């Protein structure tokens, strides 16, 4: 087997995600044979440093021996069983562990198989909660401009990235969009905290005006990942929790991308000292091994569905692979690594090195900003540094960086013209230095 033969077989039968397939007439696919640690290797022996954790999921490296062992052991006993009317030890143990580490009050776990599905669950649970309480006026959701929560129709409706959403607009429920606290737009000299606090005024107004018709507010805490890795200060979350309590509206925290240490703490909500009513988890939950997501909620929400069958209040939502034992064992092994290896503190050193390695890019003539939250660092490329005028999107400058990265053995997959590092936590300082070097080279070439 070699790269070319597998590529040709692929292009005869596959339709790849988030891809204009015609691009592959000129941009080769990269067939991967195996992965080890932070590296991927193709069939011709070329290696690629996985700077984006294979779409933000891989936390502790490819072919991690501890996660491998957990899945192998589970395979000898139970691969899957229906979770309606049945249970098994891995899903119970995982639920106990998540309740133990999640923000206080999140005491119930409902499982699915993708981040979008977890968001759908949160939206439906919130709506259904109010309905079970007899309040049928609440049918809407508030979300932030530039937000992204997935690509199923409910999740898409509460997102605001036009690239993904605008085609399907006629199919979507109508959400209420509120200004983002995105600190890219702060005034010169203004702190992240001051700008984020100032941006909250529009959310307060929306809640005051629409509280009686709103089920919940949904946000990505601290980082709007698919929205070009735009970032904001925890003060916004603190004020949002207070306002949701004041107006009697649920708060949904979508930590699918930023949970499990990405933001610098286990969960981003911790940095604001808050607990949401719903916490959506996914991606890194299994260390990047198997599809698994969770929607965590409170006993108060759970109680609104707990009734005689004839009351017709049950949450009749299901996924065939809900609580899959293999995925749960992978998740438990992932949580064991967090517990045993002091990962959060170790990541702080890696994050500091990543910030230092990329700091000089702030002076680049085609970089408007280098920003960072924990183990996420983003570099915003622009045509004009002084005015922050972007490149025309048709020029695809970020794609030029991507292609240069592949030539140099680094997987960088920009969001438009935003280059970002979101690597596995097993990356070394030397490998981080390589990311920064290759990113600079690619930006130099893209801006030429």
Image (tube, rainbow, N blue to C red):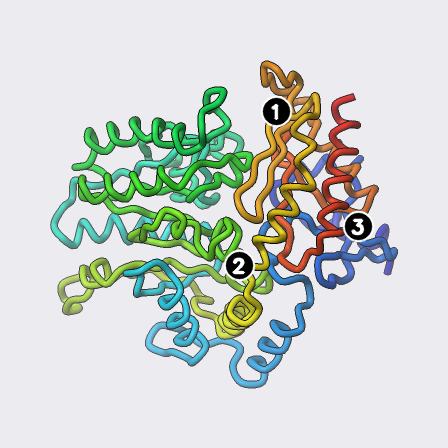
Q: Is residue 212 above or below residue 326?
A: above
10 Å crowding of disc 1: few (<14), some (14-19), many (20+): many
Which of these two is toward me, 109 or 369? Answer: 369
Q: Position of residue 104 (x, y in %)?
A: 31, 60
Kindly tell me whether residue 252 is visible in this rendering: yes
Residue at 61% over, 24% down: 368
The image shows residue 286 at horizontal and vertical percentages of 54, 64
Q: Which residue is mark 2?
A: 344
Q: Is residue 248 left or right of residue 417?
A: left
Residue shown at 74% from the left, 51% from the top: 431
- Judging depth in this view, the residue of 351 and 162 nearest the camera is 351
Marked residue nearer the N-terminal end (3 or 1): 3
* Residue designated by label 3: 7
Q: Which residue is mark 1?
A: 368
Q: Nearer the viewer, mark 3 or mark 2?
A: 2
Assign a secondary structure to mark 3. helix
């Amino acid at each position: 087997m070699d790269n070319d033969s597998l590529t040709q077989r692929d292009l005869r039968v596959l339709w790849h995600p988030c891809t204009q397939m015609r691009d592959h007439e000129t941009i080769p696919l990269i067939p991967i044979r195996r992965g080890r640690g932070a590296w991927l290797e193709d069939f011709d022996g070329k290696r690629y440093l996985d700077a984006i954790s294979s779409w933000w999921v891989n936390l502790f490296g490819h072919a991690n021996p501890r996660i491998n062992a957990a899945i192998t052991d589970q395979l000898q006993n139970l691969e899957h069983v229906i979770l309606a009317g049945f249970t098994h030890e891995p899903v119970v143990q995982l639920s106990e562990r998540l309740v133990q580490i999640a923000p206080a009050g999140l005491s119930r776990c409902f499982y699915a198989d993708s981040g979008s599905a977890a968001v759908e669950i949160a939206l439906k649970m919130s709506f259904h909660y109010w309905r079970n309480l007899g309040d049928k006026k609440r049918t809407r959701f508030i979300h932030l401009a530039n937000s992204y929560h997935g690509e199923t129709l409910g999740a898409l409706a509460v997102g605001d990235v036009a690239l993904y959403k605008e085609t399907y607009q006629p199919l979507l429920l109508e959400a209420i969009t509120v200004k983002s606290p995105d600190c890219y737009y702060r005034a010169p000299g203004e702190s992240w905290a001051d700008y984020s606090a100032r941006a909250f005024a529009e959310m307060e107004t929306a809640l005051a005006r629409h509280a009686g018709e709103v089920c919940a507010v949904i946000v990505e805490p601290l980082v709007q990942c698919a929205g070009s890795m735009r970032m904001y200060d925890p003060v916004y979350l603190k004020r949002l929790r207070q306002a949701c309590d004041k107006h009697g509206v649920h708060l949904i925290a979508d930590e699918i991308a930023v949970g499990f240490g990405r933001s610098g703490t286990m969960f981003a909500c911790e940095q604001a000292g808050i607990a949401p009513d719903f916490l959506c988890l996914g991606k890194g939950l299994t260390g990047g091994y198997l599809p698994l997501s969770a929607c965590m909620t409170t006993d108060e929400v759970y109680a609104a569905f707990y009734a005689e069958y004839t009351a017709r209040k049950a949450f009749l939502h299901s996924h065939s692979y809900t609580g899959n034992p293999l995925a749960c064992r992978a998740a438990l092994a992932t949580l064991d690594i967090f517990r045993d290896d002091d990962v959060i503190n170790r990541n702080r050193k890696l994050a500091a090195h990543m910030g230092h390695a990329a700091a000089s890019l702030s002076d680049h003539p085609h970089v408007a900003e280098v920003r960072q939250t924990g183990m996420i660092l983003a570099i915003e490329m622009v045509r004009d540094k002084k005015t922050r005028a972007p490149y025309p999107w048709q020029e695809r400058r970020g794609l030029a960086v991507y292609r240069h990265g592949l030539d140099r053995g680094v997987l960088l997959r920009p969001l438009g013209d935003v280059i970002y590092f979101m690597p596995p936590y097993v990356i070394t300082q030397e490998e981080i230095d390589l990311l920064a070097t290759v990113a600079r080279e690619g930006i130099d070439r893209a801006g030429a």
